[in-house]
Amino acid sequence: MKKLIKSKEFKLALTLIIIVGLGITVYGVLNILLKNKDENKNELSLNQPTAEIKAIYLMSVTGGQITKEDLEAHPEILPVTDFATLASHTNKHIAIWIDKDAISLLPEGWLNQEPQKFYPIIMIGYNNALYSMREKLGMPIIGPMVDWSKQTLEPGFSVWMIDSYSENGISSIMKGYSEKIDVSRILEISDELLKKSLSIIEYKNIQYGFSFSLPVSWEGYSIAEDKWEGEALVQGSDVVVEQGPIILIRHPQWTKENPRQDIPIMVFTIEQWNELQQEKFHIGAAPIGPTELGRNSKYVFALPARYNVAFPPGFEEVEEILENHPLKAF
């Protein structure tokens, strides 16, 4: 045994065992450290707030007029390089930006269809709105034909959006900007147009004295009526002591088979509203009451508590409409 321990072969084998053991130990420690690093990285990414997408930018796979650095600095712009991804995001009220080198990615007529035809459309790279929107995008814009071989197109961007939609026809905003491509500037214009697009149609109720602004995509809306009931604040009692109308503004795509989110407007007399605030009666089982939207000398107009608790299709759009304070009393 002593001879074996003293032999060169034994010493070499022992050295190899020690080296391998140390290697395994180091590998294990590094693996744990890297795993913890990845977990911390994932945790950070989960905790970081994601930017609200304000515009979707269709560009070529080889790049566009907006630089990669600008896109990285503005996470509220979502760059895409194919039509399918673009179309999957237009179910939300959003601005559509199209790079001049990505026009060929759009199917013919797509921009004239709902819902995208009601959103701001911005062409990045052409300052002439007529050229950008009619000649290149095939928009239904009436005007003289232009010999573009005699025209000089300057760098910039162009804007198009419907701003009026009725039986008498359609009018639109069509404007060109001979400016340097500045993302903040284009975002500013997009935000203005998005807000405007939420208040193009006006519903006016003469009976109670209020108007309500709607986006152009609600053209063809209908009005339905319901009623609210206020019950006495007596335990075990379901006696109705007050009642009044609810005006329902209904989306044009609403059907019995596939109902969408209505915009419900409760109408109270001033006296009824004051008594509700004094808890002389209650409405429904919700622990909170209706939210006031506006008032005139006779009536208070309010949004029912938990009106969208079932989250029907279109509830996000209604929330966005309401955020812009669309009701005006007179």
Image: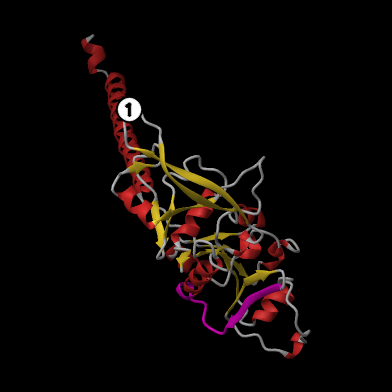
Mark 1 Cα-neighbour bin, 10 Å: few <14, some 14–19, many ≥20: few
Q: Let me know if residue 173 is in the magenta part.
A: yes
Where residue 211 appears, x then y in whole percent?
A: 51, 65
Give whichever of 164, 10 is nearer the camera: 164
Give the amino acid at mark 1.
Val
Instruction: Find the residue positioned furthest to the bottom.
Output: 150
Q: How many marks?
A: 1
Where residue 200 appears, x then y in whole percent?
A: 57, 68
Q: Quadrant of the N terminus?
A: top left
Give whichever of 287, 271 is nearer the camera: 271
Q: Is residue 100 left or right of residue 181?
A: right
- Can residue 59 be seen at all in this image of the molecule? no
SS class, disc 1: helix
Q: Is residue 12 left or right of residue 268?
A: left
Residue under the image location 57 percent in, 46 percent down? 313
> Which residue bears the numbered disc 1?
20
Give whichever of 318, 304 is nearer the camera: 304
Q: Is residue 115 above or below residue 290?
A: below
Where residue 177 appears, x then y in whole percent?
A: 56, 82
Q: Is residue 234 left or right of residue 69?
A: left
Residue under the image location 48 percent in, 76 percent down? 182
Give whichever of 27, 257 is nearer the camera: 257
Q: Is residue 3 above or below residue 278?
A: above
The segment highlighted magenta reads 169-185
Instruction: Find the residue positioned furthest to the left.
Output: 2
Instruction: Find the residue positioned furthest to the top.
Output: 1
Where residue 207 appears, x then y in whole percent?
A: 53, 62
Q: Quadrant of residue 142?
A: bottom right
Q: Quadrant of residue 249?
A: bottom right
Q: Let me know if residue 57 is in the magenta part.
A: no
Q: Is residue 273 left or right of residue 321?
A: left
Q: Quadrant of residue 155?
A: bottom right
